[in-house]
Amino acid sequence: MTGLILPPGQGRKLITKAQEVTFKATKEDGSAISIFEVVVPPGFDVGAHVHSDAQEFFYVLEGELQLLAFEPTRRTEQDWHEWESPDGDKAVRATEGASMFVPSGTPHAFRNASDKPARMLFQCYPSPVHELYFEEIAEIWAAGGINPDAIDEMRRRYDVSQITPQRYQPPALLDPQSSEPRGA
């Protein structure tokens, strides 16, 4: 194979407790956009954030994700789950076949609030910003989990302005009634 055609499940993989990312098309392949297949485990919340230059596209392949892409009437710092747009839009429960396009400058987020992994196709323009981002965040997670200070510093270098915290709380640690950590 030339690398331009990949069989199912193939591509360079970065696997951590918080995500599994398979590189499908990269700058190294000559692509202006980075394309990834991402497995999002239950309990993972990327946190609301915004990119000044990057554009992104998400397509749910299996499972379900909660998706958000709009400027809310009021930003909150702890989470984005109840945000509302001036037009009354709220986060959407997205299942297989749903997609989200995120223009530059648009706050957005995703989380897996279900008890099963979700799988999505993720594209980012321009390449290789998210390729480098995924490589570095995998190193941070491998070094001992989610280190907020290291992640914040790294995100600034990759055009990510974080609005609400990134979280990973596997379902065993969640209160089944609220999707919030037990004892919170």
Image (tube, rainbow, N blue to C red):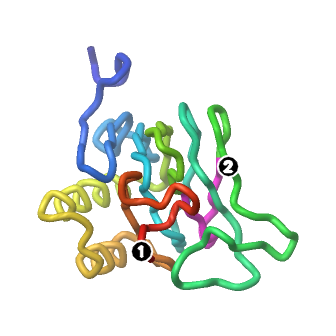
Quadrant showing the C terminus: bottom left
The image quadrant that residue 72 belongs to is: bottom right
Which region of the structure is painted magenta? 100-110
Residue of label 2 = 93
Q: Residues within 10 Å of mark 1 (few under 14, many from 20)?
A: few
Foreground residue, 169 or 75? 169
Earlier sequence position, callout 2 versus callout 1: 2
Residue lying farthest to the left in this orientation: 143
Q: Is residue 74 above or below residue 72?
A: below
**Tag 2 secondary structure:** strand
Q: Which residue is rendered at x = 62% and y = 55% of the image?
A: 67
Report x, y in % for residue 165: 43, 75
Residue of label 1 = 183
Report x, y in % for residue 183: 42, 74
Q: Amino acid at mark 2?
A: Arg
Q: Residues within 10 Å of mark 2 (few under 14, many from 20)?
A: some
Q: Which residue is rendered at x = 54% and y = 31% of the image?
A: 62
Report x, y in % for residue 159: 42, 72
Q: Which mark is residue 168?
A: none
**Tag 1 secondary structure:** loop
Q: Amino acid at mark 1?
A: Gly
Asked whether, in this view, residue 94 is left or right of residue 36, the answer is right
Q: Are marks 2 and 1 in contact (CB under 8 Å)?
A: no
Foreground residue, 75 or 113? 113
Foreground residue, 96 or 4? 96
Q: Is residue 119 above or below residue 182?
A: above
Q: Which residue is rendered at x = 47% and y = 37% of the image?
A: 119
Residue 106 is inside the magenta segment: yes
The image quadrant that residue 68 belongs to is: bottom right
